Image: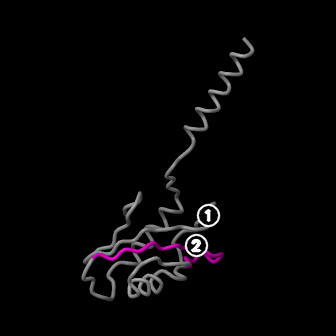
Amino acid sequence: MKKLNVVLLAIAFAITSVASANTNPTTKAQNVINKKVKTLLKKPSFKIAKELTAYVTITINDEGEMVVLSVDTESEELESFIKHRINYKKVGAQVYADTKLFKLPVRLVEESVSFDGGILL
């Protein structure tokens, strides 16, 4: 009987662990940052002839500003545009998150901005 209780307890812990694990967490901080970035990247100042993609890594400093750490893209014009539009722009709400880095997939096509991967705004 004692062994049965131990086994049931172990199963309960396993089920709880699996149920609480989230493979693609979407936090309030991520949502706020995604919305802000989408707003900032609207209406690019250059003509988009073909689809442009980039992976932008940002962090939030102590003043609540987004700081661009890297822009992974083949287009230097897109990299400059993203850095100019996002770097040191305030996030509307206070963002408190355990995550210090945010990696955002960005795709620019004619007259629109969209995000690849899990979060599409």
What's the residue type where badge 2 is placed? Thr
- Disc 2 element: strand
Rendered position, 21 above or below 79: above
Residue 19 pos. (x, y %): 55, 37
What's the residue type where badge 1 is placed? Tyr
For label 1, the residue is 96
Rendered position, 107 above or below 87: above
**Quadrant in the rendering for residue 5:** top right
Asked whether the residues under the numbered discs 2 and 1 touch, taking CB atoms below 8 Å apart as contact, a structural biologist would say no
Give the number of the mark in front: 2 or 1.
Answer: 2
Quadrant for the C terminus in the image: bottom left
Compare residues 40 and 77 and report the one nearer the observer: 77
* Dot label at residue 59: 2
In the displayed structure, does residue 118 sit left or right of residue 4?
Answer: left
In the displayed structure, does residue 71 sit left or right of residue 48?
Answer: right
What is the span of residues highlighted in magenta in the rendered image?
51-67
Compare residues 84 and 39 and report the one nearer the observer: 84
Residue 73 pos. (x, y %): 42, 78
Compare residues 40 and 56 and report the one nearer the observer: 56
Mark 2 to mark 1: distance in Å?
11 Å
Q: Say whether residue 119 is magenta.
A: no
Q: Say whether residue 65 is magenta.
A: yes
Crowd tier of the residue under label 2, counting other residues whose Cα lies within 10 Å: few below 14, some 14–19, many 20 or above? some
Pick out the residue farthest to the top: 1
Q: How is the image coloured?
A: one colour
Residue 13 pos. (x, y %): 65, 32
- Disc 1 element: loop
**Quadrant in the rendering for residue 96:** bottom right
Compare residues 80 and 74 and report the one nearer the observer: 74
Give the overall secondary structure of the magenta segment.
Answer: strand
Residue under the image location 52 percent in, 59 percent down = 28
